[in-house]
């Protein structure tokens, strides 16, 4: 069977996408090739997903007819691009999808001249099919490429499209955001323990409260401020807690975290 999907980088995010694409039968294992430098990961990916595995990035580009997906660290992008420069003189035309933080469309299109390129930023909830991916399209993409990318990322959650100038902000918010939420869950649980709850119960209460609140906001399509007002009764416990959060600069801390992560994404791209 023809190889259609090539993955360069078999780490956490690469595997998350691979597992969902195969589970949803968007690609068959025989249609997939993965390039991964670590021997232990090679063996694991081969055994778990029954896909072709190689250490040669060039083979991925020459064999994958539909998509080459870049899931490597942005710091090694230049080295990979240089390695592939000779390969790209061959007449090949797969869609290149990159999830490299801070690496711009212009950098990608310089590395892969004349190829259709899409820059995207998924987040770690993609590993359980509950992620969100923002993407922007390069100059040589067509409606067909747009459809392929949307199908690929829909396998791991929701998809939105933004202009490239907003991709660093996407990285700062949804790309880094799971860490902020995890920190909040941990802090809520610590607060419960400080108030006398057993650790296990505090963890369960904190996690389900965040999960349930997110679902309530999503399902009812209400503004977070409206839900906050519904829960906050005059002179009650919730307003006492909110007042303390405001004194501690909770809102400002999250805003500044997103801005700092956005700035770091911009720095990585330079």
Image (cartoon, helix red, strand yellow):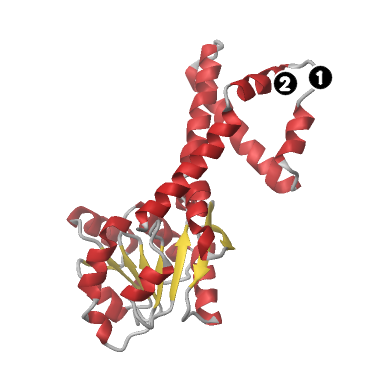
Depth check: give the residue in front, 45 or 159: 159
Mark 1 neighbour class, 10 Å CA radius: few under 14, some 14 to 19, many 20 or more: few
Q: Secondary structure at mark 2?
A: helix
Residue 160 visible, this orientation: yes
Mark 2 neighbour class, 10 Å CA radius: few under 14, some 14 to 19, many 20 or more: some
Depth check: give the residue in front, 168 or 23: 168
Residue 19, how many percent across, how many down? 41, 59
Residue 269, how many percent across, how many down? 37, 58
Q: Is residue 244 left or right of residue 14?
A: right
Depth check: give the residue in front, 233 or 170: 170
Q: Residue at x 45, y 45 (%)?
A: 261
Q: Is residue 121 left or right of residue 31?
A: right
Q: Residue 234, which numbered label?
A: 1
Q: Residue at x 71, y 21 (%)?
A: 238
Q: Residue at x 43, y 65 (%)?
A: 22
Q: Secondary structure at mark 1?
A: loop
Q: Is residue 258 above or below residue 203?
A: below
Q: Answer with mark 1 or mark 2, whichever residue precedes in sequence.
A: 1
Q: Is residue 100 above or below residue 239?
A: below
Residue 51, how many percent across, how many down? 31, 67
Q: CA distance from mark 1 to mark 2?
A: 7 Å
């Amino acid at each position: 069977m023809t190889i259609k999907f090539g993955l360069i980088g078999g780490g956490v995010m690469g595997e998350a996408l691979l597992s969902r694409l195969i589970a949803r039968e968007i690609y068959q294992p025989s249609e997939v090739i993965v390039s991964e430098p670590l021997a232990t990961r090679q063996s694991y990916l081969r055994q778990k997903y029954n896909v072709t595995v190689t250490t040669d990035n060039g083979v991925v580009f020459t064999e994958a007819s539909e998509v080459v997906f870049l899931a490597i660290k942005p710091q090694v992008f230049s080295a990979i691009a240089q390695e592939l420069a000779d390969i790209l003189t061959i007449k090949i035309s797969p869609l290149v999808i990159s999830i490299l933080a801070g690496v711009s469309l212009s950098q990608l299109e310089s590395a892969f001249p004349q190829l259709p390129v899409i820059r995207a930023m998924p987040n770690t909830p993609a590993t359980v099919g509950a992620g969100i991916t923002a993407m922007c399209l390069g100059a040589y993409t067509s409606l067909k490429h747009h459809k392929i990318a949307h199908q690929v990322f829909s396998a791991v959650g929701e998809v939105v499209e933004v202009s490239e100038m907003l991709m660093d902000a996407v990285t700062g918010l949804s790309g880094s955001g799971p860490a902020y939420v995890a920190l909040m869950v941990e802090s809520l649980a610590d607060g419960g323990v400080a108030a006398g709850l057993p650790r296990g119960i505090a963890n369960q209460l904190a996690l389900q409260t965040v999960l349930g609140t997110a679902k309530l906001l999503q399902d009812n399509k209400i503004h977070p401020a409206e839900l906050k007002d519904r829960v906050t009764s005059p002179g009650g416990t919730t307003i006492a807690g909110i007042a303390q959060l405001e004194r501690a600069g909770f809102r400002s801390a999250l805003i500044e975290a997103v801005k700092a992560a956005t700035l770091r994404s911009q720095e990585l791209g330079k």
